[in-house]
Image: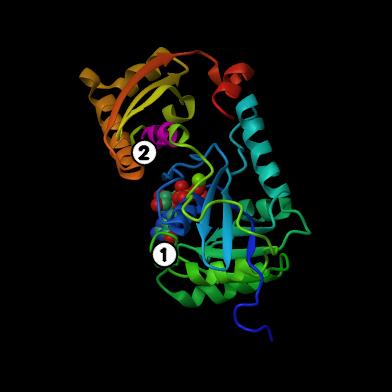
Amino acid sequence: MAEPGTAPHRCGYVAIVGRPSVGKSTLLNALVGNRISITSRKPQTTRHRITGIVTEPDVQFLFVDTPGFQTRHRSPLNDRLNRAVTDGLASADAIVFVVEGARLTAADREVLALLPPRVPVVAALNKTDALDDRDVLLPAIAALSTLREFAAIVPISAERGDGLDSLKRAVAKLLPASKPLYPGDALTDRDERFLAAEFIREKLFRQLGDEVPYATAVVIESFEQEGSLRRIRATILVDKPGQRAILVGDGGSRMKAIASAARADMERVFGGRVYLEVWVRVKAGWARSEALLTRLGY
Ligand SMILES: Nc1nc2c(ncn2[C@@H]2O[C@H](COP(=O)(O)OP(=O)(O)O)[C@@H](O)[C@H]2O)c(=O)[nH]1
Ligand SMILES: [Mg+2]
């Protein structure tokens, strides 16, 4: 047995994967202890790869939230999103495969089949808080075990924070011996400009109906800091004039609600006042423009 204190420091990349809406981004935020990845009830809210950094005395986890595989339709945007998932998996030292409690669907199996055979996988059975009866977990664990070898299967609730320590302990064992790759106080590899755009996008997904959010993108035109005040100018791109009207709302009411909720998030996470100006612009076919997609960071 190793003497206390002689275990090597570990650090590595952990891809969080799973079908849409199982709670991958909620899990990343719970692990990091801050809202860095946006979440909503709508599938395919996440479009960017974002790394959440969790530093403990003996281990630094680099958790990578990935967009779910985009299956709605083929487009240059969706091709890029799918490539982001594949790249995330290729560079992972371990994978957390998230499923929803006792429900194992065809989509879960499809995702599982895409995981590289040589990377160790921990299954996280999420949303246990929503189960009436925890006894249903046992058959779910048995069913999962027949599909692939798992390093561990851990019931969790990302929303309540249950089981996260067990999950981290199971994952830590799979990481390579390495010095930390990021400073101990870093939460994410992304900058405030990126997070600002994401907070706006989250409100679009949460406050608009079923179609419009998928037709939007957010561009940060300028981001200036004066002391603790940040001045941010953003443009929301939509595909059609009708979408612009929906987004703006009566007398600009919907737009005001979206901007004010996004600003509150920014102030909380950045820790300072934010002056936010948001414009809406119709840009037909933005999701098919390779140049624009590159500018948007996809
Ligand atoms: N009851 C419950 N809901 C959860 C839990 N984790 C996530 N959710 C909800 O599931 C929905 C999808 O979550 P999200 O993190 O965006 O899923 P993703 O698409 O896998 O990233 C959101 O409405 C979350 O609030 C959980 O542990 N319990
Ligand atoms: Mg997500």
Residue 42 vs 254, above or below: the answer is below
Q: Magenta residues: mostly which secondary structure?
A: helix
Tag 1: residue type?
A: Gly
In percent of width and height, residue 296 lies at 54, 25
Tag 2: residue type?
A: Arg
In percent of width and height, residue 253 lies at 22, 25
Asked if the beta carbon under badge 1 is closer than 8 A to the nearest atom of ligand 1, the reply is no
Residue 197 is left or right of residue 84, and the answer is left
In the structure shown, which secondary structural element does the residue marked by tag 2 occupy? helix
Q: Please, which residue is most extreme toward the right here?
A: 118
Task: State the quadrant of the C terminus.
Answer: top right
Q: Please, which residue is most extreme toward the bottom here?
A: 1
In percent of width and height, residue 228 lies at 30, 35
Label 1 neighbour load within 10 Å: few <14, some 14-19, many 20+: some
Of 22 and 177, nearer the camera is: 177
In percent of width and height, residue 163 lies at 47, 70
> Alpha-carbon distance for marks 2 and 1?
22 Å
Q: Earlier in the sequence, mark 2 or mark 1?
A: 1
Q: Which residue is mark 2?
A: 206
Q: Nearer the viewer, mark 2 or mark 1?
A: 1
Q: Residue at x 62, y 31 (%)?
A: 78
* Labelled disc at residue 98: none
* Labelled disc at residue 161: 1
Label 2 neighbour load within 10 Å: few <14, some 14-19, many 20+: some
Residue 267 is left or right of residue 180, and the answer is left
Q: Residue at x 40, y 52 (%)?
A: 34
Task: State the quadrant of the N terminus.
Answer: bottom right
Residue 122 vs 5, above or below: the answer is above
In the structure shown, which secondary structural element does the residue marked by tag 1 occupy? loop
Residue 117 vs 228, above or below: the answer is below
Q: Residue at x 44, y 15 (%)?
A: 240
Which portion, as a residue range, is magenta? 195-205
